[in-house]
Amino acid sequence: MPDASIRPSMKLLQGSEEYFPELIAAVEDARTTVYLESYLIHDDPPTRRVLDALIRARQRGVAVFMLLDGFGAASEIGWTRTLLAEHGIQIEFYRPGVKWRMPNTWRRLHRKLALIDEQTAFVGGINLIGDHFDLVHGQLSQPRFDFAIRVDLALPVATISRVMRRTWWRVSLRNAFRGSLGRLFRPDEPQAEFTRLREAWRRTRRHLRWRAPRTRRRMSRRVRLLLRDNLRHRRDIERWYLVNISAARTEILIANAYFVPTYRFRQALLRATQRGVRVRLLIQGNSDQWWTHWATQALIGELVAGGVEVYEYTESFLHAKVAVIDDAVTVGSSNIDPFSLAFSLEANLIAEDVILANQLKQRLESAIYGASYRLQATRQPRGLLRSLGRAALITFALTALRVFIAFSGSSLRMR
């Protein structure tokens, strides 16, 4: 009989009801550092329990760092900064605000990551908000459908550590120096400003000096962290999808909250069905953003007509960004839409693991057959003019979406 005390190296977690207790337990065991990244945060009882655990860790002498997106968490900056800073927790906000004429502000921190003591990490799509609350619709009768994964393997944890530490020192230094030049030239503030900048630099040096511990390369290709940014990793996540869809032999099962795929992505799915691969998509049925729903509907008909099984989740709000392709799994923060694939900092964990693939597949199938309905094929427009009109509509929808998402207001924050 297996020892119950032995923890699996990876654990699938559904919703904050499973994720938060695991995160809190890991934080309670923390001895040196805790890092946390989230797109948004909300003041509700489940989230407060996480924050209370962070405060207790800080009181034990653990260094705690929290990084939130400056747009997704814009309405929560006041109380979070006051509460956490009061207890010595360092908190920063990534690029506060979005401005029409400044495209560099369109990029958002959309990752949901946690790192405890360089030994345990969490990756997924779950923000710091309870499952039964939505920022737009309020209380939910059923929990939000989302996933995260706990990983205790040395190599992916070391990668997550490098990513989170590097992002932290870049953001903290940028925030520290924002507006400092003007303050230095004010006659009554230069000394205080120099003192503040020295303190900011002192807090950042530990991140610049830190080096990840040596790790064995075992499973280095089977469990990895994939990033999306605007420099070295612009298309890594999308490329993983395309490569694995093209190589799929038996089954593709994707659950994605905001599904607005590119032409290449749609064609890869259609070619997979032509090879005899079973392709199933689980998308939102209760849309919280009309513009993504409109763009999705403009594209779905082509996939349904091509043999792809498309299901709309109707029990509650779907927020998952996961996939099972044969025995390969991805769990993370990246939607398949222009917001994630063109603007955001994203992180997905990928794994080639039969047990994990079966676990995720069972949960997705439970949602498909217990809380969803299947879309049926409709007659496609015939004739050259109608086909051209439909292509123009799809092109317009995708182009408008790329521009509109950056300025869409509070409803964007649940991504």
Image (tube, rainbow, N blue to C red):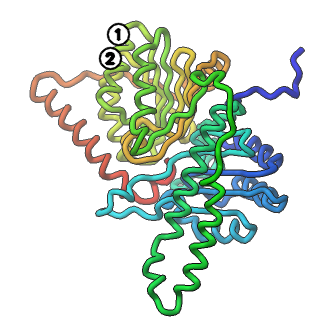
The circle drawn on residue 306 is 2
Coordinates of residue 305 in the picture (x, y in percent): 31, 19
Q: Quadrant of residue 384?
A: top left
Is residue 360 placed above or below 186 in the rendered structure?
Answer: above
Q: Residues within 10 Å of mark 2 (few under 14, many from 20)?
A: some
Q: Amino acid at mark 2?
A: Gly
Badge 1 element: helix
Is residue 295 placed above or below 310 in the rendered structure?
Answer: below
Work out which quarter of the rendered image holds the N terminus and state it.
top right
Please name whichever residue, 1 or 138, is drawn nearer the observer in this view of the structure. Answer: 1
> Where is mark 1, residue-wise?
274
Instruction: Indicate left or right for 49 with 283 as reference.
Output: right
Q: Residue furthest bottom?
A: 187
Q: Residue furthest top?
A: 276
Q: Residues within 10 Å of mark 1 (few under 14, many from 20)?
A: few
Please name whichever residue, 181 or 42, is drawn nearer the observer in this view of the structure. Answer: 181
Q: Residue at x 46, y 61 (%)?
A: 95
Q: Quadrant of residue 304?
A: top left
Coordinates of residue 243 in the picture (x, y in percent): 42, 21
Q: Residue at x 30, y 34 (%)?
A: 298
Which tag, 2 or 1, sits closer to the chain's start?
Answer: 1
Res 348 visible: yes
| Labels 2 & 1 near each other (Cβ < 8 A) | yes
In this rendering, the label closer to the viewer, 2 or 1: 1
Instruction: Indicate left or right for 129 with 407 as reference.
Output: right
Q: Amino acid at mark 1?
A: Gln
Please name whichever residue, 210 or 405, is drawn nearer the observer in this view of the structure. Answer: 210
How far apart in space, not on screen, are marks 2 and 1 (Cα)? 8 Å
Coordinates of residue 64 in the picture (x, y in percent): 71, 57
